[in-house]
Image (cartoon, helix red, strand yellow):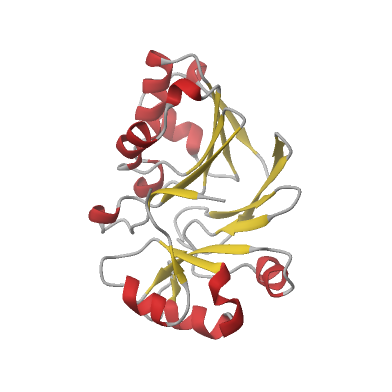
């Protein structure tokens, strides 16, 4: 369901900043917009075919919002495309004001749930940083449900239960090889949480250049850049 513009951690520029999207009926649905994402987006997506951009921001670290302002300004200067930005409770308005992006350029909504074009989006609070709020994103259509972790050291209890009971079809989970990490879910924890016969439903992201083989060895999938 999701396509990736980047799959890397903040310190793995060769993999790009982790960001995913899908297109439905001339609408672009984008999750996060880190510093390296704008360049990949304009190379990958034909914006002439897009009428509306819906952006979902999981948290305010720079590898998730670093080129958001550039994207907003670019769209407003080059295209007649409506921009809607959604978040679960982060200081995004203050950030966009700070970098000088006119409030007339976009619509900003803080909410828990929203339905857009028969697709439900739900922000779910996670644990990533003591300094800022962070959220995962559950996306549900008529016949499919997925969960995108953003950056998180946990899988929220409700999501985990739904996954084990086949109510969430795919987990997109950020993973680190570092043990006892308070910012991202460690691979060893993921191995303990996910039964072997369900690991093909997990897509690992927020990677570094050394993690691919180790993750795949245990039966998990790797997010792949378009």
The residue lying toward the viewer, choosing from 63 and 204, is 204
As displayed, is residue 106 above or below residue 54?
A: above
As displayed, is residue 91 above or below residue 150?
A: above
Residue at 74% x, 38% y: name it.
118
Name the image quarter holding residue 75: top left
Residue at 42% x, 60% y: name it.
223
The residue lying toward the viewer, choosing from 157 and 147, is 147
Does residue 138 appear left or right of residue 51 in this picture? right
Residue 105 image offset from top left, x and y in percent: 48, 18
Residue 27 image offset from top left, x and y in percent: 58, 30
Does residue 107 appear left or right of residue 178 in this picture? right
Residue at 39% x, 81% y: name it.
217
Name the image quarter holding residue 135: bottom right
Q: Residue furthest left?
A: 14
Asked if one can make out residue 199 in the rendered structure from this viewpoint, the answer is yes
As displayed, is residue 212 above or below residue 16?
A: below
The residue lying toward the viewer, choosing from 197 and 173, is 197
Residue at 33% x, 59% y: name it.
9
Asked if one can make out residue 195 in the rendered structure from this viewpoint, the answer is no
């Amino acid at each position: 369901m999701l396509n990736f513009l980047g799959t890397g951690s903040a310190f793995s520029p060769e993999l790009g900043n982790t960001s995913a999207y899908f297109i439905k009926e001339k609408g672009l649905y984008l999750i996060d917009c880190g510093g390296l994402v704008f360049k990949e987006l304009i190379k990958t997506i034909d914006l002439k075919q897009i009428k509306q951009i819906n952006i979902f921001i999981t948290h305010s670290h720079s590898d998730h919002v670093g080129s958001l302002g550039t994207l907003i300004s670019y769209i407003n200067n080059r295209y007649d495309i409506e921009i809607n930005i959604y978040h679960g409770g982060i200081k995004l308005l203050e950030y966009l004001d700070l970098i000088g992006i006119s409030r007339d350029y976009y619509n900003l909504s803080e909410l828990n749930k929203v339905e857009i074009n028969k697709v439900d989006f739900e922000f779910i609070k996670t644990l990533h940083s003591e300094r800022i709020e962070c959220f995962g994103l559950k996306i549900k259509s008529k016949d499919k449900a997925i969960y995108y972790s953003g950056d998180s050291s946990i899988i929220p209890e409700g999501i985990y239960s739904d996954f084990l009971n086949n109510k969430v079809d795919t987990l997109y989970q950020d993973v680190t090889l570092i043990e006892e990490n308070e910012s991202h879910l460690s691979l060893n924890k993921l191995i303990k949480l996910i039964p072997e016969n369900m690991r093909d439903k997990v897509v690992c992201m927020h990677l570094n250049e050394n993690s691919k083989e180790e993750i795949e060895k245990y039966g998990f999938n790797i997010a792949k850049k378009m």
